[in-house]
Amino acid sequence: MANADVTRFMDNARISLPGAVDDALRLSFRAVMTEFLGATNIWQEEIVFDTVANQRSYDLVCSEPGVIHRLMSLVNESDTPVAGQMAEPAVLTLTTLPSAVEELTATVSLNVDDPTDREDYPVFPAWILTKYELTILDGLLARMFVQPAKTYTNERLSVLHMKKFRAGMSVVRSEVERMNLHGAQAWRFPSFA
Amino acid sequence: MAALDTVANYVSSARTLLQDATSPYRYSDADLVLALNLGVYEARKARPDLFIGRNDNLPNYTTNDSTAVSFDKQYRLALLYFVIGYAQLRDEEATQDARAAALLTSFRTMLLGQL
């Protein structure tokens, strides 16, 4: 992540949370990112792999520093959807047993993993914080304000920021579905039509 | 070096505010170090977020020396107030009782933001 972005983000949080300790801020920051990334599917990666005849299950490995959270789509070389599921994260199970080698592309959404950067912040693409700083800040403030018996405890502000966080995530989900294309609609013809 | 970094810093600062800076002391090292330990325990009860990552291993200070006291800088004054307030609990004068109560209340108020 970009240090300047994180520094500004944390400064913004500290201003609203008198007496908050940085360890607690970092812990809540990670929790908020887990919720944000899980709810919006904004961090995605395409994983290309070859099937093996008579093998139904495949371990997916992402190259980015996150954990696989959800299977978004699975297509073959001709962009035709292939049926599969991921009951256990990162373990893809094909519905139909493949009879030959075929190249498939699984698009997965990612979430924050245990490794953190040198300052113990969660690792995720810097552009996410740059673009959605205010929404993520709302989530962090909501989580911090609701903590009991702290110098910054404020239930009313927690409710307010949680509403803004939820509304912000709805916008993010919509932008993810439309691939940030203004005026686009989420629905499109399926590739086989 | 930051303020109130070590056990000796706390003991020395407490003695200054207790007006007990000249030997022989009214408040022994052992009494003040005990108060420091109890203050840390009370802080752990009230604000567990001050101890994130320590796996519940609370420190146990034994002597008035240069052992580091790892405590968030924002709350070191509150811990010092606890040490002084606890030390003054043993005094029986009415003024000292009120002062001890005020200091212990300040400790909680500074940690929790409200009574």
Image: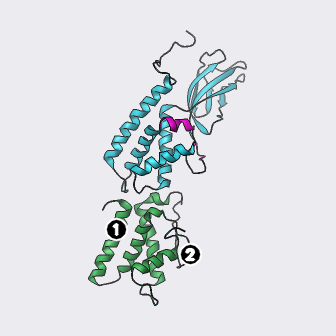
Give the SS element for disc 2.
loop
Above or below: residue A32 compared with residue A93: below
The amino acid sitting under disc 1 is: Ser
- Single out the residue that lies furthest toward the bottom: B24
The amino acid sitting under disc 2 is: Ser
Q: Which residue is mark 1?
A: B106
Q: Specify start and end residues of the magenta stretch as a single range.
A: A113-132
The answer to which quarter of the image holds residue A193 is top right
Q: Quadrant of the N terminus of chain A?
A: top right
Query: Can residue A118 be seen?
Result: yes
Which disc number belongs to residue B66?
2
The answer to which quarter of the image holds residue A110 is top right
Q: Position of residue A44 (x, y in %)?
A: 57, 30
Q: CA distance from mark 2 to mark 1?
A: 26 Å
The chain painted green is B
Q: Position of residue A98 (x, y in %)?
A: 68, 20
The chain painted cyan is A
Picture residue at 43% right of the left edge, 51% below the top: A14
